[in-house]
C-alpha cells in the first residue's frame, strides 16, 4: 500500500460518511503574518472552528501538506520529518466523540475500507484533566466499548493511558497556560502503534510506555475535541458548538502499514534514499543520519519552493535556506556532487498526490541549484574574511564536496591540530553576516569558544524574539484594524500593478502586518520610478473614490471565468469566497477587509526588491 493508496482510502472512507473534501491549503498562508508555515490541517479552518459557517457544510475531509520548522534539529532519527501530509476530518458542531472514535478505529483496522492494522498493536491515550478542566471519562468509556468489539479488554493503564495537558491537550499555542485569549482548544485522544520488534532503550527510562521516546510506540493519529475557548481572565468556556479536529500523519500511517519503525525505509522514502546512496556511493546502514537529513531537507525544500518561497535571510526564506544548506552539508560530507537526480526522484515520489510538483519542476530545480551556488560563494567569502582578518591562509580547509564525515557533530574539529582558532566575535560574524551555523563554521576548519558563542547567540535571539513578539507563535491570525486595511490595500495594489505592467502580472505571495504590507509578484524587470508613481496614484485614486468592499460565495469555475484574480489559495472546492472592491477589483480571498476603501486614507510604496529574474517584491504602507 502506497502513500497515495492511503490517501484514496481515507478520503473515500469519510466521503461515504457524509464528508465533503476540501482543497489543500498552501504551505504559506496568504496574508497571515502570525505563522511561518501551515503546520496542521486545522490552521486554515480556525474561523469555522470558532463558529463561522463553512460553505461546504459541517462535515469536512482533506489531506493537508504541512511543515514544522521546530522539527529541523530532530531530523536524523528514524521517525521525524519536517514536511508531512496530515489526513484530516472535521465536524463543525455536528458529530462528536461517540461517532469520531469508532470511525477512526474502523479506518485503522478494517481490511476492505481502511488500513487493516492489527488492533492488538493499537494503544490509546486520553486527557487526565487538570484544575480547570475535568478528565475525559467519556472517551475512556467509548474506547473500552470499541476494543470490546474486537475482544480486547481495554483497561486503563494497560491499553488506555491518561496523560496531562502536556500530552493530551491540543491548541496551536500548546497547553492551556500558553494559549492567548480567544484561542480554541480541547482535550485529545491519540492512537499509538506498537512496533514489537523494537526493544526499549533504558536511556529513556526504566519502563516503556506509549509516550516513551524510545521508538517502540509511535503516535499515528489524534482526535482533538475542540470544546473550549480561552477567556481574557484565563478561564475557559464552551465554544458555541463542539467540534472534532482529526489529524493523522500520512507518513506515520505508512510506517504502521509496513510495520517498520523507520520512516525512511518505507516505499515513500526508499527510492529517495537509494538515489542518494547511488549518487554518493554510500550505504544507508553506515550513513543513516546523513541520508535521512538529505532526504528530508531536500524534500521539504522542494515543497516550500513550489509554493513561491525563495531562499533569503528572513522568515520563510530563511527556513528554506537553512534546509537547503543543512542538506548540502551532509551531501558534501558524503562526497555528493550533482543533486538534480535526487530532486527528480523526490518529485516522482510525490507527484501522484501533488501533480503541481512536476509542472513546476524547472522552477523548483532552479531555486535549489541557485542557492547551492550562493552557498559555495558564501563559504569562499567566509574563508577570505578569516584569512584577511588573521593575516594567514587557512590550513587546508576541507573543499566543498570533500569534507570529513563529521557534519553536525559539535567539537569534532577542536582536536584537529591544523584547525584555525578564531574569536567568538568573528565566529558570530560568520553566523550573522555570512549565514553559517556553528557546525558549518567548524566544518570549514575553524574553532572558537563554544560558551562565548552561545552567550552571544542567546542575546541575539532575545533581541529578535522581543522585536517580533508573538509574530510566529501560531496563534490566531492578526485581525487588527491596521492589518485589515493593509489586506484591502494589497487587492488594490494587485490590480494597479496589472493596469500598469500588464495582465500577465499576478501575485506570488504576501505578508501583512500593522506596520506595512509586503507583496510579491511575477515580472521580468524592475518597475521604473515612473511606473511606481502610476501604480501608487491608481491605488490612492481608488481609496479616494471610497469604493464599497463586499464578498460573495461563487462557484470556483464561474469566478475564474469572471476574471477573478489571486493566488487561488482561498478556494473551498466547488465554491470560493470572492471579494469585490467596487467594479475595480475581483479577487479570490478568505478576508477580512474594510467595508469602504476610504478608510485607508492613502497608500505609499516604500521600496521594491528583486527576488530573482522573474520575481519582484514591493513594500507599502497604509497611512490611515
Image: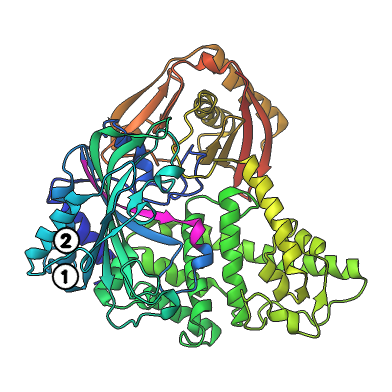
Judged left or right of residue 38, residue 210 is left
The CA span between labels 2 and 1 is 8 Å
- Magenta region: 59-71
Residue 359 shows in this picture: yes
Residue located 17% across and 39% down the image: 94
From the viewer's side, name the closer residue of 140 and 431.
Answer: 140
Circle 1 — which element? helix
- Locate residue 284 relative to residue 146 in the image: left or right: right
Q: Residue at x 23, y 66 (%)?
A: 157
- Whether 72 is among the magenta residues is no
Location of residue 140 in the rendering, given as x and y in whole percent from the top left corner: 18, 55
Q: Residue 119 carries which label?
A: 1
- Is 311 rendered above or below residue 345? above
Please state the horizontal and vertical placement of residue 527, each as a whole percent of the image: 66, 36
Label 2 CA crowd tier, 10 Å (few <14, some 14–19, many 20+): some
Tell me where residue 593 sits by quadrant.
Answer: top left
Of 551 and 426, the residue lying toward us: 426
557 or 159, nearer to the observer? 159
The one nearer the camera, 451 or 275, is 451
Circle 1 crowding by C-alpha within 10 Å: few under 14, some 14–19, many from 20: some
Q: Where is residue 80 in the image (x, y as percent from the top left)?
A: 43, 67
In the picture of the structure, the residue carrying the numbered disc 2 is: 105
Q: Point out which mark residue 170 bears.
A: none
Q: Is residue 149 above or below residue 509?
A: below
Amino acid at each position: 500500500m502506497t502513500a497515495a493508496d492511503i490517501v484514496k482510502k481515507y478520503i473515500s472512507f469519510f466521503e461515504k460518511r457524509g464528508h465533503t473534501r476540501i482543497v489543500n491549503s498552501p504551505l504559506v498562508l496568504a496574508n497571515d503574518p502570525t505563522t511561518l508555515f501551515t503546520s496542521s490541517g486545522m490552521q486554515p479552518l480556525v474561523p469555522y472552528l470558532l463558529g463561522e459557517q463553512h460553505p461546504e457544510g459541517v462535515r469536512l475531509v482533506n489531506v493537508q501538506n504541512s511543515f514544522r520548522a521546530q522539527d529541523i534539529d530532530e531530523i536524523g532519527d528514524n521517525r521525524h520529518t519536517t514536511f508531512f501530509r496530515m489526513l484530516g476530518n472535521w465536524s463543525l458542531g455536528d458529530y462528536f466523540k461517540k461517532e469520531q472514535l469508532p470511525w477512526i478505529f474502523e479506518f485503522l483496522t478494517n481490511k476492505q475500507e481502511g488500513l487493516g492494522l492489527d488492533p492488538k498493536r493499537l494503544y490509546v491515550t486520553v486527557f487526565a484533566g487538570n484544575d480547570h478542566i475535568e478528565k475525559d471519562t467519556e472517551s475512556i468509556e467509548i474506547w473500552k466499548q470499541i476494543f470490546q468489539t474486537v475482544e480486547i479488554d481495554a483497561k486503563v493503564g494497560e491499553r488506555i493511558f491518561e496523560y496531562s495537558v502536556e500530552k493530551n491537550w491540543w491548541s496551536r499555542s500548546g497547553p492551556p497556560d500558553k494559549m492567548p485569549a480567544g484561542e480554541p482548544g480541547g482535550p485529545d485522544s491519540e492512537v499509538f502503534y506498537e512496533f514489537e520488534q523494537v526493544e526499549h532503550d533504558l536511556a529513556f527510562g526504566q519502563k516503556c510506555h506509549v509516550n516513551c521516546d524510545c521508538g517502540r510506540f509511535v503516535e499515528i493519529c489524534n482526535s482533538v475535541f475542540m470544546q473550549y475557548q480561552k477567556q481574557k481572565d484565563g478561564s475557559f468556556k464552551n465554544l458555541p458548538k463542539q467540534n472534532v479536529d482529526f489529524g493523522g500523519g500520512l507518513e506515520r500511517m505508512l510506517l504502521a502499514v509496513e510495520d517498520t519503525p523507520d520512516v525512511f525505509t518505507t516505499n515513500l522514502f526508499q527510492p529517495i534514499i537509494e538515489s542518494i546512496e547511488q549518487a554518493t556511493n554510500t550505504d544507508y546502514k553506515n550513513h543513516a543520519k546523513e541520508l535521512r537529513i538529505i532526504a528530508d531537507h531536500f524534500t521539504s525544500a522542494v515543497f516550500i519552493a513550489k509554493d513561491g518561497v525563495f531562499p533569503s535571510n528572513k522568515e520563510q526564506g530563511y527556513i528554506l535556506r537553512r534546509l537547503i544548506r543543512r542538506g548540502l552539508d551532509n551531501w558534501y560530507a558524503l562526497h555528493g556532487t550533482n543533486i538534480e537526480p535526487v530532486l527528480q526522484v523526490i518529485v516522482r515520489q510525490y507527484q501522484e498526490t501533488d501533480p503541481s510538483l512536476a509542472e513546476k519542476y524547472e522552477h523548483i530545480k532552479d531555486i535549489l541549484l541557485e542557492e547551492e551556488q550562493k552557498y559555495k560563494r558564501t563559504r569562499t567569502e567566509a574563508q577570505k574574511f578569516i584569512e584577511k582578518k588573521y593575516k594567514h591562509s587557512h590550513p587546508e580547509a576541507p573543499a566543498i564536496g570533500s569534507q570529513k564525515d563529521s557534519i553536525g557533530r559539535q567539537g569534532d574539529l577542536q582536536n584537529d591540530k591544523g584547525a584555525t582558532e578564531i574569536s567568538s566575535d568573528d565566529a558570530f560574524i560568520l553566523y550573522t553576516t555570512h549565514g553559517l551555523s556553528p557546525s558549518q563554521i567548524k566544518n570549514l576548519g575553524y574553532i572558537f569558544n563554544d560558551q562565548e558563542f552561545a552567550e552571544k547567540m542567546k542575546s541575539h535571539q532575545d533581541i529578535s524574539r522581543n522585536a517580533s513578539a508573538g509574530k510566529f507563535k501560531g496563534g490566531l491570525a492578526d485581525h487588527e484594524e491596521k492589518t485589515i486595511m493593509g489586506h484591502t490595500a494589497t487587492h488594490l495594489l494587485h490590480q494597479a500593478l496589472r493596469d500598469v505592467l500588464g495582465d500577465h502580472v499576478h501575485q506570488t505571495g504576501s505578508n501583512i502586518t500593522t506596520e506595512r504590507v509586503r507583496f510579491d509578484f511575477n515580472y521580468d524587470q524592475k518597475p521604473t520610478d515612473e511606473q511606481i508613481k502610476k501604480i501608487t496614484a491608481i491605488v490612492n485614486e481608488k481609496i479616494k473614490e471610497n469604493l464599497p468592499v463586499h464578498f460573495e460565495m461563487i462557484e470556483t469555475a464561474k469566478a475564474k471565468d469572471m476574471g477573478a484574480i489571486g493566488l487561488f489559495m482561498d478556494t473551498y472546492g466547488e465554491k470560493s469566497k470572492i471579494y469585490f472592491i467596487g467594479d475595480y477589483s475581483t479577487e479570490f480571498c478568505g478576508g477580512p477587509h474594510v467595508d469602504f476603501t476610504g478608510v485607508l486614507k492613502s497608500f505609499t510604496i516604500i521600496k521594491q526588491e528583486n527576488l530573482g529574474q522573474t520575481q519582484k517584491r514591493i513594500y507599502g504602507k497604509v497611512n490611515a
